[in-house]
Amino acid sequence: MQTEQDTNNPGLAAGSRVGGYTVNTVTYLKDIHAWLYQLAHDTSGTRHIHISNADRENTFGVAFKTVPEDSTGVAHILEHTVLCGSARFPVRDPFFSMLKRSLSTFMNAFTASDWTMYPFSTQNRKDFYNLMDVYLDAAFFPNIDELSFKQEGHRLDFDDDGDDPKLVYKGVVYNEMKGAMSSPDQVMVRSLLNALYPDTTYRNNSGGDPAEIPTLTHAQLKAFHARHYHPSNAYFYTYGNLPLADHLAFIEKRVLARFTRIDPKTDVPQQPRWTTPRTTTYAYPLDRNEDPIKKYQACVAWLLTDIRDTFEMLVAAVIEQVLIGNAASPLRKALMDSQLGTALSDGTGFEAENRDTMFAVGLKDVTETDAPAIETIIFDVLKRLADGGIDPELVESAIHQIEFHRKEITNSPYPYGIKLLISITASWLHGGDPERILQLDADLERLRQALSGDRFLETKIREYFLDNPHRVRFTLAPDQEMAEKERQRVESELAERLSRLKENDRTRIRSDAAALEKLQEAHEDLTRLPTLERTDIPPAVASVAFTPGVFQPPVWAYDQPTSGIFYFTGGLGAGTIDNRLLPLVPFFCYCASKMGTSACDYARMARRIDLYTGGVGFSANARTRFDDNGDCLPFVSFTGKCLNRNLDHLFAIIHELTTQLDFADHPRLRQLILEYRAGLEAAVVHNGHRLAISLSARNFSAANHLQELWGGVHQLHAIKQVASETAEGDLSHLAADLKAIGRRLFCRDNIELALIGETEMLTHAETPMGNLTGALAAGGKPGFVSPPVTVPKGLPTEGWSTSTAVSFVAQTFATVRLGHPDSPALAVMAKILRSLYLHREIREKGGAYGGFALYNAEDGLFSFGSYRDPHIENTLRVYDGAADFICSGDYAEEDVKEAILQVCSEIDKPDPPGPASRKAFFRRMIGLSDETRLANKQNLLELDKKTVVAAAERYFSDRAIPKAVAVISSRDRLEAVNNGPGNRQLHLHTV
């Protein structure tokens, strides 16, 4: 009998009526200690899910099925445009304005292949309803005016008002998708959908193909909204500890009372099944300076089960984990052991977001002719498993991973309430039952019963793969002429359009540009938008104290309610590692849990890690101490986590990795080099803004120098050199170097540890913890000291070329660190500059996806950055103009308050007990006390405009302050800057 009671919503049961809603089902979700309510609205037909629990971080979301019939990007452009003003909030940019007026822990919007979502999370009740008010009006009653469409979507403009003007395409989404379609992984995933779903909406690029985006009309955009953004096509979601009845009344009053039910005709049909397999090749742009020989990707992809069948979805997820979940998984191992490629192909895995799910697997960095061999390997493994059987331990390991990640509550990469929303959205929108996803017990029990029979998964492998003709052998081919051909196509298209323009067309284009500039420059009355006040900001900072008792420093215990999960976290000093070996430290971290040990090969270790833990990993960190010297503190962090029942197994694995790590398996080591390099290369275009900032910041301190060496473009260069030096097969020197790093790190006097969990776990950990520290080598030199690095003199002014159709532009200069009286003002200035200056100049006017300012309080650096930016020189001029803006004081006390809200929303972002304790441990390592954090926040809350302007004068008014510049872009764009009229010279390098 159900004994738990939902104290947030007493008396609410299945069949209850709440306003115009009927509660259809109520279920207790025991794994996450929450209640699930499923409701429907009688007159509009809208559906609503509410998850009630004790979490103060409340979440709202509304999702719509959006099913584009072409690749004009209509759903994506609409997502942007509805956030540009609405009936009750007719301001130019209410979404970005609310970022300033809120304490939200998350605000965003997403466009997927067949749905669009508008979610947010916040810990403040007033803020929750403020944000919901704006989100509801934006989604259901947007202005969708033509100028906003042209700014966010696409427009024609003249690049020069001289005697011979040329037409150009502009628009935020247009430039965003030019950047996206420069990335091989984006091209791979979207092309796979096009190949495997040729008869449904998934064949289209929902983000927008830059070649088709300019064909979308304003009328088509409005028509798409009228049909798709109707309550009859809407799915509402709320989560947290606030009462559901209040949410429902608010939504009904603001929206639902004004609509009646329609049939939006947005159901996605199943893809008609093929009777024979297919073979296809798609292209992606590759830089002319790269060698294309081994830049192909090849895979096999299948159409699988209906997304609404939760049992088949669970079976497919288990089979995915069995086949490719870890290095020992038979299909992954066979592909990697073939040495045909460096890593699994982009898009590999079970894709459970579409009406019909899919599975793909293959290799990247292969040659043009490797696809048939890769297909043969895949089918050989599948047939061997289907005929010979699957190791039961692999199945148990797969189920354990599903159970662990279902049980663990984390706020990364999204708040937990939003993670739950994303997990159910795709199935829910296609008619699936969210309860079956959130509560897997029935399906897990059914699976265990099926596994007790004869050859259940083997039969499924045959059904899903071997006997399934709806599959494609897919090749992604590099095309070094593609970017140039596309540039010429666009130029020709624009030249042809220019030739057909009449005088009134030219006048309209210029008048639109002038009107848009006027709109972007206009000062708006933002008082129409709701806001929070300083008094709504909690004055304290969250802190977690260690628990004295069983353990003594350097072992720190944190007794926390972690829902049956034990967390192990440690730091190993890296300051005494030889300078020559420092570039290898991140690769050491990458392969430390993947190489195996002298007692256990890598395949067996991979199995043990998946069978008994939620993951074990290492990472390189370069931090700056909070002491009088502010020295660099380099260390390797290592983490592990497990269910309480597996604590001894976790310690056994960590014990073995820290005392018997072995690099003698040279074929495996070579495999990891190529895999690691491929991952770094794939991240360049996605993280171009972060990489550019790292490049620009690298010469300001030892910590910044090491951060770039360990996590930036220079790390990619280092691993490319390693790959080249070991290409002939001699890895003995590398293995010796990695072993030397291990000897420096794994010493008894070079370790600090945190154990996080409930009392029973911490007590249980006493013996294995003592065994672990006792087994570490004695006499090592403590490495929590500044590293042996020499920071180059001078600051870079550089351009780094890679395959991209857009740019990432960064500028950095030195200020002061957290603890200095001006630190809060610098944090506020970063928010003011982003909201009031850079957003307007770089995104709205310049068409980049984003422009931002960052104050790095730990290192005392101030940076500007842009993301997917069509400009370089103009953006650098905007950065130069930031000083005039911030020193002018051309902003109000209200703007300062809004910036304080933004800074506090980051300071106060909550974490579950495990991650919160881990952060507290690392703050203690670098000497950042809770007292310093609290004093910083108190000083922040006391800031006013006068103080901010005075601080701005100290750090921005001197134009002679040295500034570093780094730009990541294409070679042509970088050379255009150097050959342009701006007299700016970038030293050019290749990523």
Image: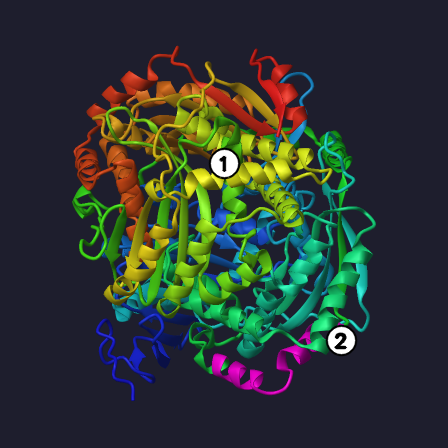
In this view, 101 is above or below 346 = above
The numbered mark, 2 or 1, whose residue comes first in the sequence reads 2
Q: Where does label 2 land, which residue?
A: 467
Percent coordinates x, y for residue 237 in the rendering: 39, 65
User: Image height check: is 304 above or below 926?
Assistant: below
Q: Residue 53, image x and y in percent? A: 28, 68
- Disc marking residue 604: none
Q: Which quarter of the image is occupied by the N terminus?
A: bottom left
- Badge 1 amino acid: Gly
User: Magenta region, mostly helix, strand or loop?
Assistant: helix
Mark closer to the observer (2, 1):
1
Quadrant of residue 506 in the image? Answer: top right
On the picture, is 803 further left or further right than 737?
right
Residue 461, magenta (yes or no) = yes
Quadrant location of the C terminus in the rendered image: top right
Question: In the image, which residues are magenta?
Answer: 444-468
In which quadrant of the rendered view does residue 268 lie?
A: bottom right
Q: Which mark is residue 711?
A: 1
- What SS does tag 2 mark? loop
